[in-house]
Image (spheres, rainbow, N blue to C red):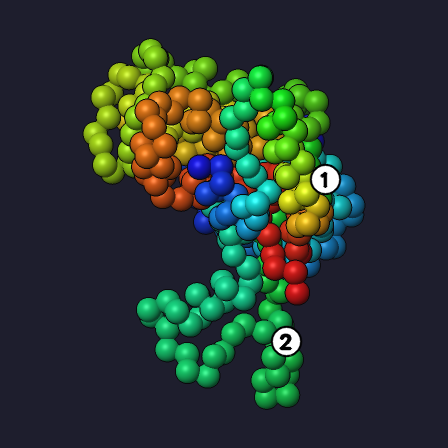
């Protein structure tokens, strides 16, 4: 529902990701964080852009 | 004691706040007893130039209702700010943007397209839209500029007090008038209502909150005693300031959030979303997806009154 709501507000879906990672899955956790960081870097900084 | 000088103004609003002031019935005479009303467009024939002619700070208190969505409203907000010692954001629109701020899901071009072209009652083959300046018979006519974004009063001028509500209930209005009259206003920046949530003052039976289906208000006749949220109706109580007297709840209607976020909460919609997420009891992905579908317009529902005041303030405008 958060994603649905953010889409209504014009925020790219790629900026939000929900994953379940167990405490024993350290490598997986690291790779998800890396992927997400890379994805956000590609999108560039978020500007609120509230016009006027 | 000299009588107080009071001004009332409406900007982007429906007029309900002004009517609410009159709704105090015979108590309005008490208001007139303590205050001279020097400006009130809905009721008294003072013009802008009368206000412009006043000295700065000549007005003791200004009750400003409505959000700010065009240049006229902005300039009157600035004018009244200069002339008034105390500025009160009166009603949900002035406090949080209110219903007009749902316009922040769109922009000026889309709003004009809808209002002057698409709406079924239009016949506008020449695509005539309001212009800020128009030449008619050699004379220049002006209209205020319509903004892309609806603003709260605080986003335009400094505000001392906030009186929420759509409209503020009569007892709250009398409390404000009484506080002004007896010089017992709280510290500036205060919201004049409860600091707690609506849930805190709601006397419905609250048991375990676990929901598997969301109902829109017209899809169910709720049990009158039990918490509406537990019955699957999106009641904004957990993320809404109390002080309204639970008027909607007492007639079996869910809270829609017009008192804005409670003290300490920055974003009403996000807070409510978090409350709803924590009581969802979907067994599997499919069921969760169905429940998400059941909320047809999450942003419009959770930010019904608070979009302009939220962290994002509006749907992002495309970068030109």
* Residue B241: x %, y % from top left: 51, 25
**Visible in this render: residue B253?**
no
**Visible in this render: residue B146?**
yes
Q: Splitting the image into 4 quarters, where does residue B148 fall?
A: bottom right
- The chain holding disc 2 is B
Q: Which residue is mark 2?
A: B133
Q: Report the quarter where the C terminus of chain B lies.
A: bottom right
* Residue A50: x %, y % from top left: 65, 51
Q: CA distance from mark 2 to mark 1?
A: 30 Å
Residue toward you, B140 or B247:
B247
**Residue at the farthest right position:** B56
Q: Are marks 2 and 1 on the same chain?
A: yes
**Residue at the farthest bottom position:** B137
Is B73 above or below relative to B191? below
Query: How many C-alpha atoms fall within 10 Å of the one at disc 1: few (<14), some, or many (≥20)?
Result: some
Q: Find residue B10 and name its label.
A: none
Residue toward you, B294 or B47:
B294
Q: Splitting the image into 4 quarters, where does residue A30 fall?
A: top right
Q: Report the quarter where the N terminus of chain B lies.
A: top right
């Amino acid at each position: 529902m958060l994603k649905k709501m953010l889409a209504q507000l014009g925020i790219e879906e790629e900026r939000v990701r929900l994953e379940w990672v167990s405490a024993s899955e350290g490598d997986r956790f690291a790779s998800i964080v890396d992927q997400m960081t890379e994805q956000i870097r590609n999108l560039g900084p978020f500007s609120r852009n509230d016009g006027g | 004691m000299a009588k107080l000088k009071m001004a009332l103004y409406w900007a982007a609003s429906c007029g309900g706040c002004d009517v609410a002031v009159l709704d105090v019935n015979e108590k309005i005479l008490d208001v007139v007893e303590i205050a001279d009303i020097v400006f009130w467009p809905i009721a008294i024939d003072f013009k802008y130039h009368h206000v412009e002619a006043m000295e700065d700070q000549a007005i003791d208190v200004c009750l400003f209702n409505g959000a700010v969505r065009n240049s006229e409203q902005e300039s009157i907000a600035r004018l009244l700010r200069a002339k008034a010692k105390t500025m009160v954001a009166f009603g949900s629109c002035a406090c949080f943007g209110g219903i007009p701020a749902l316009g922040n899901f769109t922009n000026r071009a889309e709003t004009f397209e809808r209002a002057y072209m698409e709406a079924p009652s239009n016949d506008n083959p020449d695509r005539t839209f309001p212009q800020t300046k128009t030449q008619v018979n050699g004379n220049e006519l002006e209209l205020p500029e319509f903004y892309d974004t609806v603003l709260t009063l605080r986003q335009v001028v400094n505000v001392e007090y906030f009186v929420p509500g759509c409209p503020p209930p009569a007892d709250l209005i009398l409390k404000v008038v009484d506080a002004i009259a007896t010089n017992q206003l709280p510290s500036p920046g205060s919201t004049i209502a409860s600091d707690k949530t609506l849930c805190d003052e709601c006397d419905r039976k609250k048991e375990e909150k676990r929901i598997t289906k969301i109902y829109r208000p017209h899809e169910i006749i709720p049990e009158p005693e039990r918490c509406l949220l537990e019955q699957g109706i999106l009641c904004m109580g957990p993320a809404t300031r109390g002080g309204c007297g639970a008027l909607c709840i007492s007639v079996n209607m869910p809270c829609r959030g017009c008192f804005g976020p409670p003290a300490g909460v920055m974003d009403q919609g996000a807070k409510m979303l978090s409350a709803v997420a924590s009581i969802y009891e979907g067994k599997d992905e499919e069921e969760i997806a169905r429940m998400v579908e059941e909320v047809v317009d999450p942003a419009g529902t959770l930010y019904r009154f608070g979009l302009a005041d939220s962290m994002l303030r509006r749907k992002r405008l495309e970068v030109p």
